[in-house]
Amino acid sequence: LRAGPIGPLYHTWGLIKPSCKSLHVKRDIPGFLLPRKRSMARHRGGLHRIRQRMKQEEELQLANAARWGNESIGPNGMFGGVQVYYDPFRGWRWWYTDRDFNPVFTTPVVVNDMSIAEALTTQIRHLQRHIDNR
């Protein structure tokens, strides 16, 4: 709140009525009508970082999808390989075209450095140990 010949006695939150007498005095001040600087500091690289991260995740998903497609379906079971896309509500999804030209949509399978067969064997052994311990 400022009181004086230029400022009002009440807080206007930066808005001045066109009929206000102080507008004629203030408009000649450089930077009053159009601020010269930003009111808040700019965050650098926001959209660039998001785009970069999406590309990295897409490349990772493509590599995992290709490995999964070759190991579980095989090159003779599909046309063109496994493709990936991002659904904002459900996350990454995979799809491929089968031999009957039908699109097949699937959820991503976690593929580490070990093959899918090794991962399944490890899961089966873990479940057998769990059953044996009962």
Image (cartoon, helix red, strand yellow):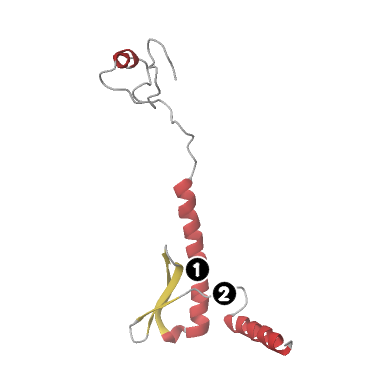
Residue 123 picture quarter: bottom right
In the figure, is residue 27 to the left or right of 49? left
Give the residue displayed 47% in from the left and 46% down from the top: 46
Of the 4 image quadrants, the one containing the C terminus is bottom right
In the figure, is residue 121 to the left or right of 86? right
In the figure, is residue 115 to the left or right of 125? left
What is the residue that sits farthest to the right in this orientation? 133
Number of numbered callouts drawn? 2
Give the residue displayed 36% in from the left and 15% down from the top: 29
Question: Residue 18: x percent and y percent?
Answer: 26, 21
- Say if 133 sits above or below 22 in the image: below
Residue 12 vs residue 61, the one in the foreground: 12
Mark 1: amino acid: Gln
| Element class at badge 2 | loop
In the figure, is residue 8 to the left or right of 63? left
Give the residue displayed 52% in from the left and 72% down from the top: 64
- Say if 46 sits above or below 134 in the image: above
What is the residue that sits farthest to the top in this orientation? 5
- Say if 131 sits above or below 39 in the image: below
What is the residue that sits farthest to the front in this orientation? 10
Q: What number is the disc on residue 111? A: 2
- Say if 47 sits above or below 73 in the image: above
Give the residue displayed 48% in from the left and 54% down from the top: 52
Question: Residue 41: x percent and y percent?
Answer: 49, 34
Q: What number is the disc on residue 61? A: 1
Q: Earlier in the sequence, mark 2 or mark 1?
A: 1
Question: Residue 74: x percent and y percent?
Answer: 48, 84
